[in-house]
Every structure is written in structure tokens, then in C-alpha cells.
Image: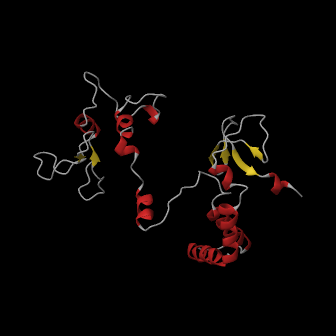
Amino acid sequence: MHHPNGSRMRSGTLPNGEPQPFYFPDNHPSMPSWFKGMEILIRERGLWPEGDDLLAQCPGFRCLPGRVDCCCRRILFMQPDFVSQKSQLQELVESCGHLCDFYPKYHCELNFIEQYWGAAKLRFHVAGRAMTIDKMEKKVIQCLDDVPLLHIRRCVFQGFLSDSTVSHYSICLVMQTGLHASYQHIMLVFLDHRQYGQTKNTIAIVLYPLRLLRK
């Protein structure tokens, strides 16, 4: 669908290093400023398989393992300029001179914001019921403001500086079933904040270091 005033993607890079605009020029006779579409982008790169029709994407966005040319989406996403493209958030953070480091999904032991939010939710629960939306909004803001700065800093220290959690992620520790280490690990694959999948031998999530279990 064409949105004349919508967001536009930046140009890509052809295999020969030249820029590749993703949109037709403004003076195009029939589709001025329209997105070219994946097929045209792939053909301009010389990657379209002759005599073969490609799907836009594999069913359910699940490409077969090892395939790099099974659908248009897969072919483009495997191109160097697509692989190296950073998110808009990361580019904004780095343009301000900061480092941008994303947390693993659903690991509140590393993200101090989760602990801060938990402290605010406790205050919200203790404060009693809000009868209107306006009162609820004011109550949420007040509960967030009531969390002491010292408490927030302790959450940051626990998440970022504690060797009991971050060090294991930084060395990409991979546990095997039956292998013992200096920390007790629970090997779960987390799907969201309230759900986890089957235990796997090749994935370890550090949850409870032994020194935290000691009485």
C-alpha cells in the first residue's frame, strides 16, 4: 500500500557498491514515489532466479533451515546491507555518543527497570483502589515517584555490576546436562514474562547463583 506522506526507508546498497533507491522517482509515469516491491529490488541486484517464481515470504515466516533463496524476504534479509542495518533506536542512541546494548528478552534479573517497576507496582497495590481513570493515572505517577533514588541505584548495581549474573551472559556460558559449575543453573527457554518452554541441553539461563541461595 502506498502512503504519500508515510515513513520511507533509506536506500540500500547494490552488490557493486552503488546506492539502490527503494522507491520509484517522483517523475515516474505511473507510480511516482511508490515502493518498488521486493521482486524489483531483487532483480536490480541480479539475484532473481530465472524461470522460478518466489513467494513473498515462507508460510508463517518460517524459512527452512539452511535456505537462503526460498522467498523474497529471505533473499533480501540475507544481503549485507540488510544484515548490517541497525535499528532506528540504536542509531539514535549512538548518534548522541552513547553505547546501545540490548538486554536478553524476559530477563528481569538483568534489567533494573523491571525491578523498579515491581517496586512501583507494590506501592500501587498497597495504596488501595482508584475509583476513576484520572485518579488511577495520578496514582501510578505518584507510585513511580515514590520509589527512592537509592533503591533504583541498588537495582542498577544488582543488574549491571553483580558478577553473579552479568558475567555468565558476557562469557556466553552454555551448560550441558549433568555439567557442574560454581553456580546452580536452571535451564529454561523463556517465551514471555509468565511462560517458559521445554528444558534444552544447550541453553542456560542463570537465575539463582549459589551464593544467593545460602542462608
Quadrant position of the C terminus in the picture: bottom right
At x 82%, y 55%, the residue is: 211
Quick check: 143 left or right of 9? right
x, y (%) of residue 106? 62, 52
x, y (%) of residue 5? 25, 59
At x 47%, y 28%, the residue is: 66
Total marks drawn?
0
x, y (%) of residue 75? 36, 34
- Residue found farthest to the right: 215
Quick check: 133 left or right of 46? right
In this view of the protein, can residue 129 be seen by the observer?
Answer: no
x, y (%) of residue 164? 73, 55
Residue 152 quadrant: bottom right
Residue 18 to residue 178: above or below = below
Residue 114 quadrant: bottom right
In this view of the protein, can residue 28 be seen by the observer?
Answer: yes
Quick check: 154 left or right of 136? right
Residue 171 to residue 70: above or below = below
- Residue found farthest to the top: 51
At x 79%, y 47%, the residue is: 182
